[in-house]
Image (tube, rainbow, N blue to C red):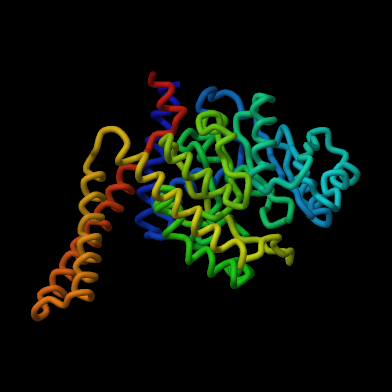
Amino acid sequence: MARWVVSARSRYIDVKQRLSRASGVTGGGRETVDDELRCRDDRPSPTVDDPGTTPRLAVVIPSFRAAATIGAVLRAIGPEVDHIYVVDDGCPDSTGERALREISDPRVELLRNPRNLGVGGAMKRGYARALADGVEIVVKLDADGQMDPRHIRRLIAPIVHGVADYAKGNRFAPPHLMPSGSSPRALRAMPAARRAGNMAFSILHKGATGYWRIGDPANGYTAIHARALKRIGLEALADCFFFETDMLYRLNLIDAVVADVALPACYPGSGSNLRLRRVVPRVAWMTASRLVRRLRAKYFTGAWNLGSVKLFAATAMIAAAAGLAGWRWIRPLSGSEGSQAAAACLLLGLGLLVAAGLYDARTAAREPLSRRSSHL
């Protein structure tokens, strides 16, 4: 086992150095380069726990009003998948029943929620069943056809090779990192409103989850190792559309490693069930709440570290700037001394805030839970 890991690691480092010099990748960060190297070979790979076997793999498909597309999605799933759980999330058009009628695949199992809980509630039901069946890796695949099942092996590669606990698709990765045959114009098919929303919330998402190098935090095409799934606690996950961000937030709390995998966007004309005017305020509020809770748990609960000091100092400086500006507005100070002091505090506070963010990014976990457990 040790000889296999050392050999694979040395070959990976050599290839990574050559690829980095040749392509100059900067957009997706270290995770995107890592995943591209590991995803070039589509053959099944050994698990880190048992290098002689392939992992037990399951796909969970949350379904709601997707009767027209779920059949094509199920037919495209390859033989590498052992279990397929279709979760009918209180769907009025009986998506799950239609899937069973159209597909005679013994791997397909229908799970029903008595009422509509949202994508998170549906995924929690599927995750629980996968864990009960002893599955090692679980993939989330939407029923609307916007995630190509042909890329499942590519998506799970970082987990199979023991370099990540969780993998996410990245629609914004550079074209040369995408799978062969992908159209460089695929991203243009993304609805403009969705593209703008992803860009607007990207930084807030990264701050709330702590995964600063993830290029597409809102992407729902994901895979997770069973060990990480057990550690985060299924019941704590959000039931609603905030599920993906909440998952990343909780993975960060257990220091799980998350990898970006370059996967093309796919929009076959199906619309979204979300209503932006109702969703955007809730997403902003819930993301901000996770940001505060994560920073409190990571830096102010228990022993302090350098990041704690930087965050505290940044908060103090920004608060002082606000206080000086308010005092000058209520009771003008002589000359421009008040304005200069407020500006100095604000600039110092913002600088400390950036330094705290860089510290947060640098101290992210690099070793997956599986390897840490094997060292115990």
Toward which corner of the image does residue 206 lie, by quadrant? Answer: bottom left
Q: Percent position (x, y) of residue 287?
A: 48, 54
Given residues 96 and 295, the one toward you in this image is: 295
In the rendered image, the residue lying farthest to the top is 376
Residue at position x 39%, y 49% in the image: 292
| Residue 31 visible from this viewpoint | no
On screen, 322 above or below 126? Answer: below
| Residue 256 visible from this viewpoint | yes
* Image quadrant where one finds the C terminus: top left
Residue at position x 55%, y 51% in the image: 169
* Image quadrant where one finds the N terminus: top left
In the rendered image, the residue lying farthest to the bottom is 335
Residue at position x 31%, y 42% in the image: 363
Q: Is residue 366 left or right of residue 230?
A: left
Residue at position x 84%, y 52% in the image: 92
Q: Percent position (x, y) of residue 47?
A: 55, 29
